[in-house]
Amino acid sequence: MNGFAHASCAWFYEAMTDHPSVPSASPNALANGLRVLQLLVDADAPLSATEIARRVGLHQSSASRILATLADAGFARKTGPRSFAPDFGVLSLGAAAVDKFDLAHRPRAAMQAVADRAVGHTVALSILWRDQVIYFLRSSSRTEPRLFDAEGWPLHLSAPGMRLLLDLPEGDALTLLDKSRQRFGWAEPGPAAPGSAREALDQARAALDHDCLLLDDWQAPGQRAAAITVDLPGHAPVALSVAGRSDLLDPDTVRLVLHAGRRDVEAAMNQQSH
């Protein structure tokens, strides 16, 4: 469920300001509430108010008040005398919010065309949001595009994530990789996978060719993931990616597929925005 709390800021603000127990939510109160909500969503198990206060840096009484507000609004639920977990309101926010983003709808036909060119591969259209990649559309040659996936994925193993990091100042990219490590850990599923943030950036920079990033054997031996940036003004940084067995398409063909797909996605977005 990673990403739902980020996607629901407007809804959460309304809940905080409209709720009787919070007549006028200050910016700090709103920020702390969002941090607590994101912490609940990211956690593998229910958390106590004491643990939440420690992680967020709040007094326990402040954390308890925020949890009470979240529970009353349907975003958190008590799972025991002192523990809390996300409630179903978080899911409703994600489902409602995704309809507000044109990336989830306008390029569907273009994405299917990319998938038809890359038979046997999975294609995705993603954004870099802070320290994580959010997938708006995923498809393959045999399935309809799947809408919105915010489960979360380690940045150093994500071709679209690494491609987008290469366009950032090096210090910012290293900071985001470190935050991703804190959230997801640092797996090395294959011998080619980088062992550190610095290695990830250096290896990705060396693998960038004709604006395309090709990562072989990072996620698993015999697997290739490739990505290219998509120029969509007004959006968060966007990347188009293709992933599959490395013996199905040669690198030059993968690059051609990505460049053609980028043109199709940009044309689809521009055509329907007028």
Image (tube, grey):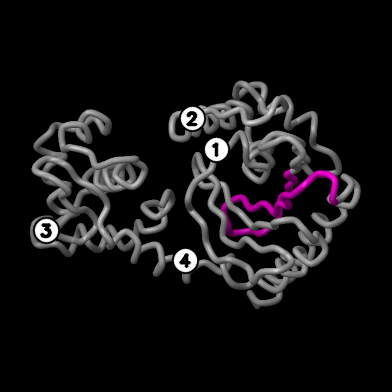
In percent of width and height, residue 138 lies at 62, 61
Q: Are marks 3 and 1 in contact (CB under 8 Å)?
A: no
Point out the image quarter for the C terminus.
bottom right
Q: Are marks 2 and 3 in contact (CB under 8 Å)?
A: no
> Of the residues shown, which amino acid type is indicated by label 3?
Pro
Q: Which mark is in front, 4 or 1?
A: 1
Local SS, label 3: loop
Ranked by sequence position, the earlier of labels 2 and 3 is 3
Kindly indicate the quadrant of the structure image that contains residue 124: bottom right
> Of the residues shown, which amino acid type is indicated by label 2?
Gly
Tell which of 45 and 258 is nearer to you: 45
Q: Which residue is mark 3?
A: 23
Return the mark for residue 98.
4
Q: Is residue 174 above or below residue 158?
A: above
Kindly indicate the quadrant of the structure image that contains residue 200: top right
Query: Disc 2 versus disc 1: distance between alpha carbons?
Result: 7 Å
Query: Disc 4 versus disc 1: distance between alpha carbons?
Result: 22 Å
* 143 sits left or right of 12 in the view: right
Query: Disc 2 versus disc 3: distance between alpha carbons?
Result: 39 Å
Q: Are marks 2 and 1 in contact (CB under 8 Å)?
A: yes
Q: Which residue is mark 1?
A: 154
Ranked by sequence position, the earlier of labels 3 and 4 is 3
